[in-house]
Amino acid sequence: MSDLSRDFNTMISQLRPAPWIQSATIDPSSYLPVVDNVSFESLQADGGGIVTCINVAYSLSLLEFGITHPDVRVPSMLIIDSPRKASGSNLDDQARGHRTYQRFQTLAEAHGSQIQLIIADNDSAPIPGAAFGKIELDYDNPFVPGVAHPGPEHAHRAEDES
């Protein structure tokens, strides 16, 4: 557990979600993040770009920990939805997004054959790199190429399902 806690703290140090963060650990009983002695549940209640970055750091730490510790069984695929959505657009927010994508790229370059990392984002990656493939989806092309659309009679909003 101390290795995972150390790796999570290192990831937080690299991504720097907020300059005021002093410590980041993993709770040994829940295996959830604790940042500056604040529990995961309390962090989640705050929301926003900083919390999103902490969640991404936690997920990336688990992914990388599973690669470096094969005896720990965690999935080798990670899907992250909108890692920059809750962030603002000031220079600090943009820098945080840039650091996050640099970390995605570093992981893909170091462990590409061992992991699958899927990032759904409204904008292109803020850094160039061959590690990032791009699939654009829109109303006329809503699915990943090769996945057949079920037809308009099967397209329903999840909220409308009972």
Image (tube, helix red, strand yellow):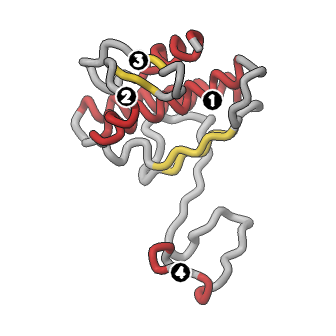
Mark 4 to mark 2 CA distance (whole Å): 37 Å
**Left or right side of 51 for 77:** right
Q: Residues within 10 Å of mark 4 (few under 14, many from 20)?
A: few
Mark 3 to mark 2 CA distance (whole Å): 10 Å
Q: Residue furthest left?
A: 90
Residue at mark 3: 24
- Which disc number belongs to residue 44? none
- Identified by mark 1, the residue type is Leu
Residue at mark 2: 39
Question: Which circle's residue, 3 or 2, is located before the other in the chain?
Answer: 3
Question: Which circle's residue, 4 or 1, is located before the other in the chain?
Answer: 1
Mark 4 to mark 1 CA distance (whole Å): 33 Å
Question: Which circle's residue, 4 or 2, is located before the other in the chain?
Answer: 2
As displayed, is residue 150 above or below residue 15?
Answer: below
- Identified by mark 4, the residue type is His
Question: Which circle's residue, 3 or 1, is located before the other in the chain?
Answer: 3
